[in-house]
Image: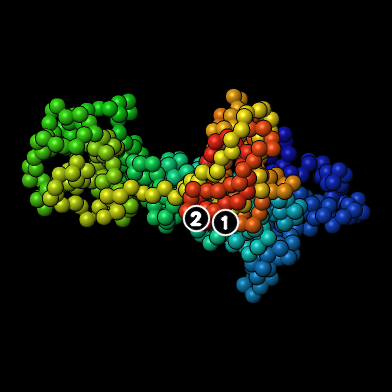
């Protein structure tokens, strides 16, 4: 029973149900009160009248009464399950299907519902639609998710896109990785990703975080979640793993020599050295751990060594993805050492190489790529300017603008077009509005990015901003080698574009 005293299937207690604005009796001649096939199907869905199949979800209390022929005409898989040679009786168990998503699926089948209520349910419905070969519904879910990909929803969407080989959704995810790598890696749901999807993310060619620290934290958070989920830590409580994080409240500027003494007592760093400087003139001693065949692991307070060993095994294959040598000494000491994932030997070797101490062998998982920062996939171009005085009106900063290749526009900046308060910026294609963004100061970031297609003419208009007077225009050129744009600009200073191309 629901809170208002109605049965869980939605039926009123008096046996009557409102369908299409009518009160319908569940007795004889109910068909006469319903004018269309859609209304009659809606009545059957809500009332369970004439149902000949009961669906259960083992592990859940949900029980649904349905009509096997309705399911069969909606899905070839249902037809085979319910009318094929392996069809069973009047009871169907679906242990792998989430009840809430399956109920939405039934509303789609019976009532033609198409309004998806949220990303998480849409992902479940998409997987059910693929399982039951309901191709139009798969397309509907894919189109919905393409519009809803954000850094916070990325992990689940990306994993589903990989599993279902959805090229359109994968392209959108690739764009998100390119534009928002750090936000994606810091997402709270990263630890819930499966190993295959997480591996694909770490090896994604568009992944370009501002610092490798973001990637390392994502790796350790994912690893701890896997240890807990798989029960490999022997039933140990989650806080034992969480203790591997840096101590809350520690100031980022903690002295480097203090950090090294605390976590790596076998290394001596000059007392007067300032954090972040290379080790010129400082005394660094190797006490034999680099040659040890069984090196001790970095000591940590409150961290069980058995947990650390299990965690290391879980994340070991992904350590080559972290470019340790691009970190600063403070980043490495403050964020990597407290994780206790690396042995003392490995920690000392990496730290000494970060500080450019020669002839120190690196661990095998530190690849040659570790020396190079990741290349940001975002490109930029500035457009030819036009000289004229300022006036306040709707500023058309680009007119008849065409690109030589499809790009995903993430930011437009025009220092000559200013607004003291937030205003709207619109991108038009003819009379059609492609997107509306928020112009703040001298620019606008588009999230999600706006796709500009080859051969299409665009205009970009900022409402109510200060800029050059209407009628003063100049041809658009670009300083980017492969971006020979065409069109006109009305700005006093260059228009800067930031974009990602396929």
Q: Position of residue 52 (x, y in %)?
A: 73, 61
The one nearer the camera, 86 or 194, is: 194
Left or right: 434, with 32 as reference point:
left
Left or right: 170, with 365 as reference point:
right
Q: Position of residue 384 (x, y in %)?
A: 55, 43
Which of disc 1 and disc 2 is earlier in sequence? 1
Q: What is the crowding at mark 2: few (fewer than 14 residues within 10 Å), some, or many (at least 20)?
A: few
At numbered mark 2, what does the secondary structure look like: helix, strand or loop? loop
The residue at 56%/40% (across/down) is: 385
Q: Is residue 125 visible?
A: no
Give the residue number, with chain letter if any, for mark 1.
404
Which quadrant does the N terminus fall into?
top right
Q: Position of residue 304 (x, y in %)?
A: 24, 40
Left or right: 169, with 17 as reference point:
left
The residue at 30%/29% (across/down) is: 252
Q: Is residue 180 visible?
A: yes
Q: Are marks 2 and 1 in contact (CB under 8 Å)?
A: yes
The one nearer the camera, 295 or 377, is: 377
Colouring scheme, one of rainbow, by chain, secondary structure, one colour: rainbow
The one nearer the camera, 382 or 289, is: 382
Q: Is residue 317 shown above or below 460? A: below
At numbered mark 1, what does the secondary structure look like: helix, strand or loop? loop
Residue 294, which numbered label?
none
Q: What is the crowding at mark 1: few (fewer than 14 residues within 10 Å), some, or many (at least 20)?
A: some
Q: Position of residue 366 (x, y in %)?
A: 25, 52
Q: CA distance from mark 2 to mark 1?
A: 8 Å
**Occupied quadrant, residue 128:** bottom right
Give the residue number, with chain letter if any, for mark 2.
482
The residue at 66%/35% (across/down) is: 395
The one nearer the camera, 42 or 62, is: 42
């Amino acid at each position: 029973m629901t809170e208002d005293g109605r049965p869980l299937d939605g039926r009123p207690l008096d046996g009557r149900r409102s369908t299409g604005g009518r009160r319908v009796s569940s007795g004889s001649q109910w068909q006469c009160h319903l004018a269309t096939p859609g209304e009659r199907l809606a009545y059957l869905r809500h009332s369970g009248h004439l149902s000949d199949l009961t669906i259960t979800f083992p592990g859940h209390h949900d029980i649904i009464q349905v009509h096997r022929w309705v399911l069969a005409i909606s899905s070839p898989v249902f037809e085979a399950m319910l009318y094929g040679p392996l069809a069973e009786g009047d009871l169907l168990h679906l242990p792998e299907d989430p009840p809430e998503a399956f109920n939405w699926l039934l509303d789609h089948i019976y009532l033609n519902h198409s309004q998806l209520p949220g990303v998480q349910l849409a992902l479940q419905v998409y997987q059910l639609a693929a399982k039951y070969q309901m191709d139009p519904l798969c397309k509907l879910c894919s189109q919905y998710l393409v519009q809803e990909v954000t850094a916070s929803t990325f992990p689940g969407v990306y994993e589903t896109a990989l599993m279902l080989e959805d090229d359109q959704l994968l392209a959108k995810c690739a764009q998100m990785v390119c534009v928002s790598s750090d936000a994606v890696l810091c997402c709270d749901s990263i630890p819930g990703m499966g190993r295959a999807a997480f591996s694909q993310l770490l090896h994604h060619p568009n992944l370009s975080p501002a610092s490798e620290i973001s990637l390392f934290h994502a790796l350790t958070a994912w690893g701890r979640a896997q240890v807990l989920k798989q029960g490999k830590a022997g039933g140990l409580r989650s806080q034992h793993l969480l203790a591997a994080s840096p101590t809350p409240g520690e100031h980022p500027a903690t002295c480097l020599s203090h950090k090294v003494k605390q976590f790596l007592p076998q290394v001596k760093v000059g007392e007067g050295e300032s954090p972040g400087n290379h080790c010129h003139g400082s005394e660094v001693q190797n006490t034999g751990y680099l040659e040890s065949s069984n090196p001790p692991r970095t000591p940590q307070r409150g961290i069980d060594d058995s947990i650390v060993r299990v965690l290391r095994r879980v994340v070991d294959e992904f350590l080559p993805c972290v470019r340790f040598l691009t970190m600063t000494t403070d980043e490495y000491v403050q964020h990597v050492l407290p994780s206790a994932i690396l042995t003392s030997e490995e920690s000392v070797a990496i730290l000494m190489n970060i500080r450019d101490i020669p002839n120190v062998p690196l661990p095998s998982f530190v690849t040659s790529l570790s020396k190079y920062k990741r290349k940001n996939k975002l490109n930029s171009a500035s457009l030819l300017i036009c000289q004229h005085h300022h006036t306040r009106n709707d500023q058309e900063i680009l007119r008849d603008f065409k690109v030589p290749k499809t790009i995903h526009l993430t930011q437009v900046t025009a220092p000559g077009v200013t607004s003291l308060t937030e205003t709207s910026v619109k991108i038009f294609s003819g009379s059609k509005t492609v997107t509306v963004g928020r112009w703040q100061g001298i620019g606008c970031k588009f999230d999600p990015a706006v796709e500009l297609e080859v051969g299409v003419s665009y205009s970009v208009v900022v409402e109510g901003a200060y800029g050059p007077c209407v009628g003063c225009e100049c041809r658009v050129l670009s300083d980017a080698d492969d971006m020979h744009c065409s069109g006109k600009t009305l700005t006093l200073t260059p228009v800067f574009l930031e974009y990602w191309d396929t």
